[in-house]
Image: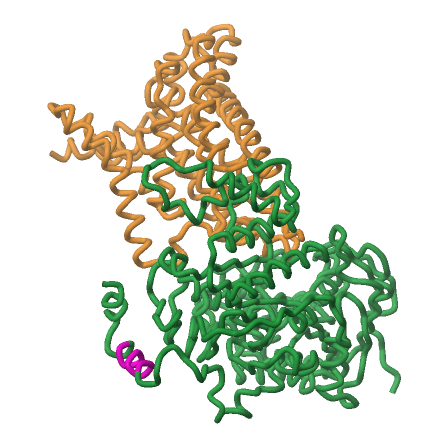
Amino acid sequence: MAKETALELRNISKSFGKVAANKNINLTVYKNEILSLLGENGSGKTTLMNMISGIYFPDEGEIFVGGQPAVIASPKDAFKYKIGMIHQHFKLVETFTAAQNIILGIKEKFNLKLVNSRVREIAEKYGFDIDPKKKVHEMSVSEKQTVEIIKVLYRGANILILDEPTAVLTPQEIEKLFAVLRKMRDDGKSIIIITHKLNEVMEISDRVSILRKGEYIGTVNTSETNEKQLTEMMVGKKITLEINRAEVEHTRPLLEIRDLSIKADDGNVAIKNVNFYIRGGEILGVAGIAGCGQKELCEAIAGLRKIEKGFIMHKGESIVGIPPKQIIEKGISMSFIPEDRLGMGLAPSFSITDNMMLKTYGDGKTPFVNRKTARAKAEALIAKLDIVTPSTETPVRRLSGGNVQKVLVGREIEAGPNVIVTAYPVRGLDINSAYAIYDILNEQKKNGVGILFVGEDLDVMLALCDKIMVLCHGEVMGIVHASKVTKEELGLMMTGAVNLTVEQKEKNFGIAKDSNLTEDEWLNAANEMNGGDDDDENRKN
Amino acid sequence: MFDTISTILVDAISMGTIFLFGCIGETLTEKAGNLNLGIPGIMCIGALGGSYGVMLYSGGVADPANMSGFWLVLISIIFSMLFAGVAGLVYAFLTVSLKANQNVTGLAMTTFGVGFMKFFAKRIDMTNFVMASKYFKNLFPFSSDMGWFGKVFLSHGILVYLAVIVAILASILLNKTRTGLHLRAVGENPATADAVGIDVAKYKYAFIILGSAIAGLGGLYYVMDKTNGTTLAEAAIDSFGWLAVALVIATMWKPVVAIFGSIVFGGLSILAMDIKSLSFFQLKIFDMFPYIITVIVLIITSIFGKKETQPPASLGVNYYREER
């Protein structure tokens, strides 16, 4: 059967500054086809799709739509070529109705009645369930997604791109979505779907294209592949990194977490029934696809986020519900490097000295701050970590990314913590700066500090961490020794294809044998928690 | 008794008109996602511009006693909107193109506007103003024959009716037209508007300037109608401007509600003057009423938290197209 090409990309490259997000990508999509785009975080999937939908413009390469060369410089151009993208974060106006959102930006006669009936027509054709007059803010996530899909169909899109459409849906809603997608495929449309979940890739797609670190790895027919092969293509062969894993005597558990559940800002479950513990002299890596509850977990440990249920025990004492300042005083430090890299932990327009003082503002007996000691500390830090800065008084935002992160991590260590929670500490750093950070962490580990390392790069985690905990949608898929696991196995766990906790249930997953509390004490704590909310108060007094 | 009530109503409507112009202008601006705290100053600039128009026209005609009311009013309206519109353009350039902080820019604009009016007011030749002001007043001379209805509703000047018409037009624009839909999308979620091909900056510029021009008419009305062309240099238009900004919140960004809201605000601010023998302390209590109402409306709308009564979601936030 001769297949008709709908969209073809030839040698597409795009870089942001020095970072190449896409390198020489070739991709073909046919009519009547669902193509899955598979790749880890930062493999360039979304960047590539944003170029097709006109949000970014490629630095190099050509795009062909229906065999004709196409220039897509804006979302408007993409509509012209009948390309529509359904973003992961919906682009909808909350106070508008479904119909108002759908016609937004279209230059045609302004007649909402006509729009309503056309929307119903489209909905009927593909089996959607939608009320055009319903306000978006009253809708469920799945309904909002429906509005987004109809929005592009209303504009006559023949090529639909869905960026992680299933991430926010329940299994039933996913089934419904897939049924709709199949109907659209059979109707002659081309669909590109980005997803991390291998079982979904196997279920929905006709072909799978794989990207890794911005490069095109290959395309396989879904019927001729399996989850294992896809994972291998996705994560690649193990790279040996020259990161030393210091061998240190482990102490008893410093931080024990049991049965922890946390909700995200949007009310969805972020962390679900998680058990794990960290010993002194140990680095526990947390692997997982972005947004799998890592941020919520870090915030909960630091006391910045309320938990739904469960225990966070530090040296046998619960730290649930006590103020962040007291948690810091107990020696637990948290540094989270968000995507914009400056957000959490440092004040960008403050100098290094001022930032050093941010966590110790309560010290000292007079109302005046003690700049002298802070400046001395800043100077020591600059010397110790080779921070490149004109002076201790330079605003942090003027430093390069690596130096900013060194300041943040350095300050956390300065306080002499016994537990360090650090998320993405090497995010966006060049190799040398990253190694400097790894050295800092290793040194802390030698000093008997327990470290929770939330990371992105599996190669780094395999080399640096003692154990790795894998999260998938807020649930622990397994906690494994870094020296006894392969990248492929981690990949399968990250995508939810393998769940060790189910297979090894009897081993009491994530529960330390030499816990600081006896089983009776854990039971007591559980009873106390169920008994009422005032237990936190009692503990404080 | 009835007489007193109708007198208060007449005063409330005439006072409220100042607020109504400012409120409609600010509503349109805020619907584009920009909180223009420069409105009080822009109303001052509008008053100055309108006065300049009056001076130019009345000074230019051969016999000021027999000037054409039509041209006088039209020219002063154009000048008022032009001056205020240029002030709006400056604000738009700073906040939309240069992405300056909206609050700081707005407050600076108010400070500037007040000073600008007071400085140039001394150079406005106001000799013909009292004579000219009669063309701004009493649009329907027959209203005096129509009893209380004529007195309350038909005894006003042209700008009062213009304000009501503008409010109704603004409401239609916002709720019934595609332009209005796009404008609201820009104020609610500029990224979404951008993604569907709406020119966010264009809409922001257009409605900041239009909003400022409309607000400027409030200043013109105060000088030429409310005070009969007698005040300019000593006019405290900016204090009415703040009430206009408060009125936007109190009327939940709905221009038609603003028509009635302006009468309530007008009534509350005039009541103190109509009720004689108030002590200084009592007078200040009365001055507080409009703000108290605003706070009450804020409390009520916040408790119920309906999305429709909330400010535009992106109000006060400058829009940057997503860049990595």
Chain for colour orange: B
On screen, A122 above or below A186? above
Give the magenta-colored segment's residue range: A521-528
On screen, B128 above or below A150? above
- What x and y, as percent, mark residue A453? 56, 67
Question: Which shade is chain A?
Answer: green
Q: Quadrant of the N terminus of chain A?
A: bottom right
- What x and y, as percent, mark residue A8? 84, 69
- Residue at 36% across / 34% down in the picture? B19
- What x and y, as percent, mark residue A62? 86, 61
- Residue at 53% across / 27% down in the picture? B87
Q: Quadrant of the C terminus of chain A?
A: bottom left
> For residue A204: magenta?
no
Q: Nearer the viewer, residue B283 or A80?
A: B283
Image coloring type: by chain
- Any part of residue A160 in sight: yes
Q: Is residue A82 left or right of residue A179?
A: right
Main secondary structure of the magenta stretch: helix
On screen, B47 above or below A114? above
Q: Nearer the viewer, residue A185 or B230?
A: A185
The image quadrant of residue A19 is bottom right
- Any part of residue B151 in sight: no
Q: Is residue A81 left or right of residue A113?
A: right
Q: Nearer the viewer, residue A217 or A434?
A: A434
- What x and y, as percent, mark residue A15? 77, 55
On screen, A202 above or below A369? below
- Residue at 80% across / 74% down in the picture? A29
